[in-house]
Amino acid sequence: MDFLGEGLRRALALLLAGDAEVTGVVVLTLKVAVTATVIACAIGLPLGFLLATRPFWGRRAAFTLVNTALAFPTVVTGLLLFGLLSRRGPLGGLGWLYTWQAIAVGDVCIALPIAAALSAAAVQGVDPRVRRTAQTLGASAWRTAWAVAREARFALAAVITAAFGHVIAEIGSAMIVGGNIRGSTRTLTTAIALYTGQGEFGLALALGVILLVLALLVNIALQVLQGKAHA
Amino acid sequence: MLELVGVRHRYGGRVVLDLERFEVPPGALIAMVGPNGSGKSTLLRLLALLEQPSEGEVRLDGRPVSGGPARARPDAAARRRVTLVEQRPILLRGTVRDNLGYGLRVRGMRRTEVNSVIANVAARLGVTPLLERHRHELSEGEVQRVAVARALAVEPAVLLLDEPVSSADRAAAQTLYGALAQERRRRPLAICLASHQLEDAYRWADDVRALAEGKLSPVTPENLFRVELPNAGTGDLKHIRVGTIEIAAMTDRAGPAILAVAPSDIFVSRAPLTSSARNVFAGRVTRLSHQRPGTVHVTADVGVELVAVVTEEAARDLQLAPGGPVVFAFKASAVRVF
């Protein structure tokens, strides 16, 4: 128990001191998570809407694929991405391996199925009369989609929260394609893994607390937005 | 003109609608009647271009707009000419005012014009006091009235109404039908409404069509029976059990079918007459109703409930009255099987 208590004391001290390295890790983590969430949701939400509303050949297979991707191990995602981005890989020319962009791409691959599958479920949960009503009143496909999205706004906000929660807590892919380079690609999760391995339990715990606080703040922000939308 | 041509529509492999042709001419006032599950709502959704027919096509002014060999997908421009009010309509998020303006805003109408149309249509449908309310603050009947107002606001060429007064009291129904009549006087508007209330259909529509098991009845909507046709018969003459009576009909078909007898094909008398009619049933009058000027619909229990139509003069001469004796007679060839 002394071990844990000591760790928490160290964590508090680091947080209060405003350590430059910790600040850098937090900023990078947020940059990667926000970028990946925005890109994944920008693609995944419309994809989920299409899956839920448009009958097309292979729709069932597409659903199965997206749902399977939900359970895809993140280290395997990182491994495949490593192969693509490595110097001899097809995307090696981009020079993104061991950069924050590589971590963001990995996070997009992880968050995209979450955004697509959960938004499809959210849209399917909307009363079908909403869509028919918008259509019969002359709404275009986009206006109809917007009317449905407004009805599913709480569920869709939960989708964005889930996607963000996954990417900010992701470690497997970030470790492989980011390399955990100090001052360059070290994120909160990879730093926690490193410091725990080095026996720097207090530092690791401090970063863990920061990770939890960040997740909490993002959830609170989304709930406030939902509340305003409901008013 | 809006029309369905050669439509066979399926849900999960089961044919729910089978119509060779169904037309809604400009300015028509059509009532579709039929029991629950007869295909009325499906028909309206196909006409509203909200579903594509599994087979056949929907045409608007002769142009295929949904289905057909090219599997045409209806676009917003075609949908803007036809508007459906569902049996249990839903209001979109926002106030009643937001809802009434929705169809106008998607057409790019300016805010001042939108407000003017909303005020006008709300007054006609008696929903002005509801304008600032949200959907959870309205009763089912109020939602139905707001939905009709919302549909009228966009001035469609064809208005489709699915059981428009199912949640309305008599006064609200009068207001609704009054507003529809006023709209039809103001501009050309075709209305096709689905109802399971035959009296309402006769009262408000120029053209009453019956749907049974997804098919249009070749005769009027009364006296429709779902039957099992026997294989055996004398030639094509078959005796088909309907309730406690057996109806003689000319048909070479066997198996499940709909049997229809037009009320105008039934002879009404107080005592059995010697005639060629194979179907003669004695019973008692249960109801007399005046659904069209000069005619009387005579409903009688003759083992099953049958409806005949006679002139007012004939009803007087026969001294028809509820509870009184009556004999219905019709020829086997007057029985339609489909």
Image (spheres, coloured by chain):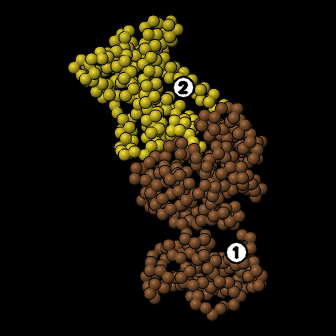
Does residue B246 lie above or below B140 as drawn? below
Residue pictured at 56% horizontal, 80% vertical: B334
Q: Quadrant of residue B318?
A: bottom right
Residue A217 shows in this picture:
yes
* Contact? badges 2 and 1 (CB < 8 Å): no
Secondary structure category for the residue under label 1: strand
Judge by depth and name the residue closer to the eye, A213 or B136. Answer: B136
Residue pictured at 49% horizontal, 50% vertical: B63
Q: Report x, y in % for residue B211.
A: 56, 65
Checking the image for residue A219, the label placed there is 2
Q: Quadrant of residue A154?
A: top right
Q: Report x, y in % for residue A43.
A: 43, 30
What's the residue type where badge 1 is placed?
A: His
State the hue of chain A: yellow
Judge by depth and name the residue closer to the eye, B220 or B163. Answer: B220
Q: Report x, y in % for residue A83.
A: 25, 24
Secondary structure category for the residue under label 2: helix
* Mark 1, other Cα within 10 Å: few <14 / some 14–19 / many ≥20: many
Badge 1 is on which residue?
A: B297
Discs 2 and 1 share one subunit: no
Mark 2 vs mark 1, CA separation in Å: 68 Å
State the hue of chain B: brown
Q: Report x, y in % for residue B337.
A: 51, 75
Judge by depth and name the residue closer to the eye, B230 or A124. Answer: B230
What's the residue type where badge 2 is placed?
A: Asn
Q: Residue furthest left?
A: A88
Q: Is residue B292 left or right of residue B161?
A: right
Residue B168 shows in this picture:
no
* Mark 2, other Cα within 10 Å: few <14 / some 14–19 / many ≥20: some
Residue pictured at 70% horizontal, 75% vertical: B297
